[in-house]
Amino acid sequence: MFDDLTKSDIENIEKEIEYRKLVLRKQLIADVQEARAQGDLSENFEYYAAKKEKNANESRIRYLENIIRTANIIEDETTIDEIGLNTNVTVYLPEDDAEEHYRIVTTIRGNSLKGLISIDSPLGKALLNHKVGDKVTIKVNDDYSYDVVIRAIDKAPDDSDDVIRKF
């Protein structure tokens, strides 16, 4: 697995684990006990739904703990005028005559629908360490590639509170 994560990503994952263990777990156990007290378990939908929710929480805790255990801690070592982690970048696509805006993030935060591009994606890998004005070829696979021109770079502070799914 070995996801590349920042210290901030790890801290946010630890916050979610703590919330799930100390708050959500107690609530879900109480829900299971309340549903169990309603009587016959063979036809008790509330009981099965509560158990399913409790088990999903435990699975999420194990998943997050595994991410932390196998994470590769990285830091942004680029200069202020280079594209690196947590950099907002505007690129021009000559082929489409359009501009697009992205933020370069760690693998766990990647969400292309929200413009969050992972450093492990073809676009993220290609843009890293480039500067404004550079023409960069994005190689998607052996048969397809395209060019972009970097128009703007903004080294924004790490706002990784949006890293993990909100509880």
Image (cartoon, helix red, strand yellow):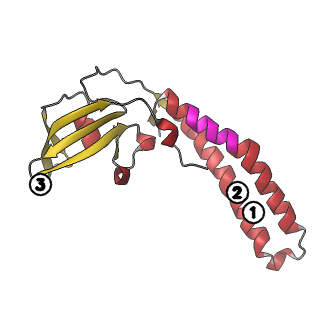
Instruction: Classify residue 96 as left or right of residue 122.
Output: left
* Residue 133 position in % (x across, y down): 12, 31
Q: Which residues are magenta?
A: 11-19
Say whether residue 18 is magenta.
yes
Mark-to-mark CA distance, 1 and 2: 6 Å
> Between disc 3 and disc 2, whose residue precedes?
2
Going by the numbered disc 2, the residue's amino acid type is: Asn
Instruction: Classify residue 11 as left or right of residue 117.
Output: right
The residue that mark 1 highlights is 51
Query: Residue 110 lies in what quarter of the image?
Result: top left
Image disc number at residue 96: 3
The residue that mark 2 highlights is 55
* Residue 6 position in % (x across, y down): 47, 29
Graded by Cα atoms within 10 Å as few (under 14), some (14 to 19) or many (20 or more), the crowding at tag 3 reads few
Residue 143 versus residue 4 in the image, above or below: below
The residue shown at (34%, 20%) is 77
Image disc number at residue 136: none
Mark-to-mark CA distance, 3 and 1: 51 Å
The residue shown at (76%, 75%) is 45
Say whether residue 120 is magenta.
no
